Amino acid sequence: MRYFLTSFLLYFSFITFSQTSKYSNEFLAIGVGGEAFGMGNSVVAQCNDVTSAYWNPAGLVGVKGWVEASVMHSEFFAGIAKYDYVGIAHSINDKSSIGFSFIRFGVDDIPNTTQLIDNNGVINYDNVTSFTAGDYAFMGTYATKLKVEGMSLGGTFKVIHRKVGDFANSWGFGLDAGWQYKRNEHWRFGLMARDVSSTFNAWVFNLDPQMQQVFLATGNEIPSNGLEVTLPRIILATAFNQNIGTKGMNFGGEIDLDITTDGRRNTLISSDPFSIDPHAGMQLSYKNIVKLRGGISGIQSFKNMDNTSYWGVQPNLGLGIGIKGFNLDYAFTRLGDAKANFYTHVFSVKVKLSKPKNAIK
């Protein structure tokens, strides 16, 4: 039980710290779609489906058919944390598209043992309750083609809600902007500005006097209402693809550079205020039916016990199957730093729907 109490207090300490930390709204940096995970999240230049609303809203103009929809589910830390995504996109005409996305990252049934010992000093297990800590994002996207052939522009407005039981919650909003340019059949370029307006979350804490006493007794600072700010992140991307050998075979790859603006991070190029995190992915496909993917990301420096340093990377593998507007994508990736053993299986489904014959024109 002491473990649960400690975890509970550490979680609250994290929230208090994150009000001034660079790592805010990190659940929105995880990614969506098995295709992207399999390529090390390197899809900003080439994404052109419903998941573009997340990766680069400019790519939403590539939505084909009347409607595209995608769902994804994955579990982290041996199923403790659940991560879910739902996206839908609609092609308005041959120049513009709209989309809506929903993301949830949550831990359910967290034991609250702060009232385990009652006022008489007696352990009472009936006082143990549970709560959910969840992060939610609601995103609306619009994209349009520009006058320059092959160029498009898009934006995503997002509303963020974070909730920790009845103890704390926040509401926030922000804006992402994206640009893509398809130079020819081989080369694509992309630029994604996440939180280009900076994203703001207003936190409100609701701790009763007894809960405050628990914080004081354990040496933790009582959290107070405040504003959490997520600074912009710029992603520059270049993608290449080429038909090879047997008819129907295609090879492609992409390199992305994530440029953060919130200070020094543990990345390949680390400085203040800008740090650069490169990652890359590749894909081998046959007639868009079978796709094999691989990628590297999370290049970080680590220290051994003798204080020497070494570099580690996060490997990613993926497989995609597509048949007549139905796509099933799988990715096998590793969560956390390059030396961790938290492997994650990611599955996502994408479908393309044609306009019903009896739909209103």
Image (cartoon, grey):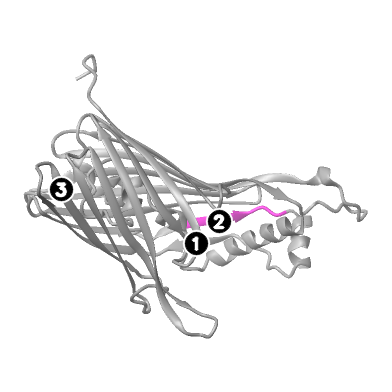
Relative image position of residue 311 (x, y in whole percent): 39, 75
The front one of 269 and 254 is 254
SS of the residue under disc 1: strand
Disc 2 to disc 3, how far (Cα)?
Answer: 49 Å
Location of residue 140 (image quadrant): top left
Which residues make up the magenta segment?
Answer: 201-207
Q: Is residue 54 visible?
A: no
Residue 6 to residue 107: above or below: below
Q: Which mark is residue 228?
A: 1
Relative image position of residue 96 (x, y in whole percent): 18, 39
Q: Earlier in the sequence, mark 2 or mark 1?
A: 2
Under mark 1, the amino acid is Glu
Relative image position of residue 219 (x, y in whole percent): 73, 70
Residue drawn at (78%, 62%) of the image: 213
Specify few, some or many for label 2: CA neighbours under 10 Å numbering under 14, 14-19, or 20 or more.
Answer: many
Q: Earlier in the sequence, mark 2 or mark 3?
A: 2
Residue 27 to residue 273: above or below: above
* Residue 244 relative to residue 91: left or right: left
Residue on which disc 3 sits: 250
Do the numbered discs 2 and 1 sit on residues whose CB atoms are within 8 Å? Answer: yes
Residue 270 to residue 293: above or below: below
Residue drawn at (75%, 67%) of the image: 218
Under mark 2, the amino acid is Trp
Residue on which disc 2 sits: 203
Mark 3 or 1: in front is 3
* Residue 23 relative to residue 211: left or right: left
Q: Is residue 76 visible?
A: yes
SS of the residue under disc 2: strand
Residue drawn at (34%, 48%) of the image: 157
